[in-house]
Image (cartoon, rainbow, N blue to C red):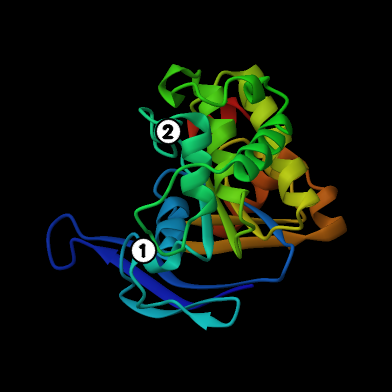
Amino acid sequence: MLEIKNVRKTFNKGTVNEKKALRGINLTLNDGDFVTIIGGNGAGKSTLLNMIAGAYPVDSGVIMIDGVNVTRLPEYKRAKYIGRVFQDPMKGTASNMQIEENLALAFRRGQPRGLHWAVTPHEREFYKQAVERLGLGLQSRMTSKVGLLSGGQRQALTLLMATLKKPELLLLDEHTAALDPKTASKVLSLTKEIVEGDHLTALMVTHNMHDAIAIGNRLIMMDNGKIIFDVAGEAKKKLTVEDLLQKFEEASGGTFANDRMILTHD
């Protein structure tokens, strides 16, 4: 479903601020893979997702999504293949639009835009049933402005919008990091339910080692723009946080320099 071949990216090339963000990344995801990504600060995790989404052009290498070479496609043309949820709950929704209008925009992603865009009665019922799945009671507030919702409600809605039309690939960039622990747990549970229930292929960046181990069928660790550890299946299930810290130190030759990950590993 996703194939990345020798992708490299350097920011501010040739200046004192030059930063090699990705150093020859090779990664293949099969249909239905749910991959968690961990790594220290500046490891290249978010840059990798941005490269896949087309937010930045790659310096070299190839990115394929479901057999289509998207390497040179602009971000808006890749949108029909990709669903994405950002760390900031405010990014994925239009606050001045109603819940059902936000869902309509998401559902019509990749379709031609005409003058007629009102929500039809059939669509309204479909969106209501979809929102009911979230278990947040929002199905009775479909005409409420999204700006009135809490951060957790907006993030859950963004997750629903990103998966309403089954994407070829779902990108989750620390999408629970800005939420309180209880809300984060709810959104994470919804994520697992939607990804596994709809058999989606997903990449999830997280700073929580426990979540990285518990969720998905595969885990990769990044450091300094490289993938330094890749584990799947039964071997992943048997991992502990201590194993991950040890693997990082073995592969990188240093200690795990990310206080937030150390503090949120249990």
Local packing at callout 1 (Cα closer than 10 Å; few below 14, some 14-19, many 20+) is some
Q: Amino acid at mark 1?
A: Glu
Lateral position of residue 97 relative to residue 231, left or right: left
Tally of marks: 2
**Do the numbered discs 1 and 2 sit on residues whose CB atoms are within 8 Å?**
no
Q: Amino acid at mark 2?
A: Asp
Q: At 55% from the left edge and 63% from the top edge, which residue is drawn?
A: 227
Does the rendering let one see residue 228?
yes
Q: Which mark is residue 8?
A: none
Q: At 12% from the left edge and 61% from the top edge, which residue is drawn?
A: 15
Q: Which mark is residue 88?
A: 2
Tag 2's secondary structure? loop
Residue 123 at x, y = what percent?
61, 44
Q: At 61% from the left edge and 35% from the top edge, which residue is drawn?
A: 208
The residue identified by callout 1 is 75
1 vs 21: above or below? below
**In front here: 109 or 46?**
109
Q: At 68% from the left edge and 26% from the top edge, which residue is drawn?
A: 185
Q: CA distance from mark 1 to mark 2?
A: 19 Å
**Dot 1 or dot 2, earlier in sequence:** 1
**In front here: 51 or 194?**
194
